[in-house]
């Protein structure tokens, strides 16, 4: 099942990395940030509801599950809002670079709160990924960073790290059968998380006249709103939940390094951005980090099987 988790983790990161493909055309048509986020999550909730109905899954949840789901929804909403708000204070490239400290935060939380062993390969993979992400950013040298922007991105990174850890706690790793946790399907969990997230964003949109919701102005805009709901949201979060369940929070977070790599690939192939040797080195380092995690998990699986 480790291979399933690795594949899901890689696909989750790639799907999430397609955010620019949907968001940038909406910004070009004048759709504001709060509206982009709201339609991203509302479309995702609608799609997940249809999937659950087709599969004839029950929507029923108990009080304990509601508490966990509400926590996850609020964490994801907080991460999304602070991340997108940081764009008001700094370049999106810098923000996405700083955001990737979340695998380090996940590793620290898992080590301190859940006594998870931090291996040398995990530390090496994190360092390779961090350096690779820094190389993907192509900002001007000597740029002055906004303290407010940095704080917003750090809050976004922390809340996303906690989100991954809570998912790990709610859906324990498969090999252990005596752990406590919800047996809710990934679809159902993601549906309620995004529903709470959507309601939080709706409430947030009323806090300022500049954050009012606006309808997508064209069929093209509706298409990209649906894209945001399906690929970087529904597919990404469902696959991420499966990956955390199968291989753990820290490896899944490190595989998230493929998110900005995918965004760079889309920028080069779709939006005509330049491809430089610096980007090539960054891509190689990120792929090396992911490969290191994959090999480490595969070796761990073989060692575990040999002892059975």
Image: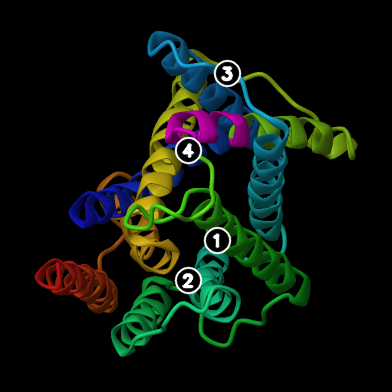
Q: Position of residue 289 (x, y in %)?
A: 27, 75
Q: Which mark is residue 165?
A: 1
Q: Position of residue 221 (x, y in %)?
A: 51, 23
Q: Are marks 2 and 3 in contact (CB under 8 Å)?
A: no
In the rendered view, tell whether residue 225 sits above or below residue 55. below
Query: Is most of the magenta stretch helix, strand or loop?
Result: helix
Residue 215 occupies quadrant? top right
Q: Which residue is mark 4?
A: 183
Residue 306, magenta (yes or no): no
Q: Which residues are magenta?
A: 184-193
Q: Which residue is mark 3?
A: 59
Q: Residues within 10 Å of mark 3 (few under 14, many from 20)?
A: few
Q: Residue at x 69, y 35 (%)?
A: 66
Helix, strand or loop at label 3? It is loop
The CA span between labels 4 and 1 is 16 Å
Q: Residue at x 46, y 77 (%)?
A: 116
Please report whichever mark, 3 or 4, sits nearer to the chain's N-terminal start.
3
The CA span between labels 2 and 3 is 32 Å
């Amino acid at each position: 099942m480790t291979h399933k988790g690795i594949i899901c983790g890689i696909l989750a990161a790639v799907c999430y990395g397609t955010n620019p493909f949907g968001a940038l055309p909406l910004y070009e048509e004048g759709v504001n940030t709060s509206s982009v986020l709201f339609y991203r999550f509302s479309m995702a909730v609608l799609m997940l509801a249809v999937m659950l109905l087709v599969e004839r899954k029950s929507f029923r949840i108990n009080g304990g599950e509601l508490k966990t789901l509400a926590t996850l929804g609020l964490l994801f909403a907080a991460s999304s809002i602070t991340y997108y708000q940081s764009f008001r204070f700094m370049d999106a490239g810098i923000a996405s670079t700083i955001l990737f400290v979340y695998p380090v935060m996940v590793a620290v939380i898992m080590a301190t709160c859940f006594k998870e062993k931090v291996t040398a390969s995990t530390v090496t993979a994190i360092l390779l990924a961090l350096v690779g992400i820094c190389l993907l950013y192509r900002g001007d040298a000597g740029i002055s960073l906004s303290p407010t922007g940095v704080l917003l991105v750090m809050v976004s990174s922390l809340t996303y790290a906690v989100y991954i850890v809570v998912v790990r706690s709610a859906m324990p790793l498969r090999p252990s059968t005596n752990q406590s946790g919800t047996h809710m399907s990934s679809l159902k969990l993601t549906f309620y998380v995004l529903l709470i997230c959507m309601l939080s964003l709706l409430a947030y949109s009323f806090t300022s006249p500049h954050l009012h919701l606006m309808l997508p102005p064209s069929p093209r805009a509706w298409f990209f709103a649906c894209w945001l709901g399906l690929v970087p949201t529904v597919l990404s979060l469902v696959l991420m939940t499966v990956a955390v369940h199968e291989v753990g929070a820290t490896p899944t977070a490190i595989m998230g390094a493929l998110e900005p790599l995918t965004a760079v690939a889309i920028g080069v192939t779709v939006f005509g951005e330049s491809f430089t040797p610096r980007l090539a080195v960054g891509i190689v380092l990120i792929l090396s980090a992911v490969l290191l995690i994959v090999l480490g998990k595969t070796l761990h699986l073989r060692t575990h099987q040999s002892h059975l």
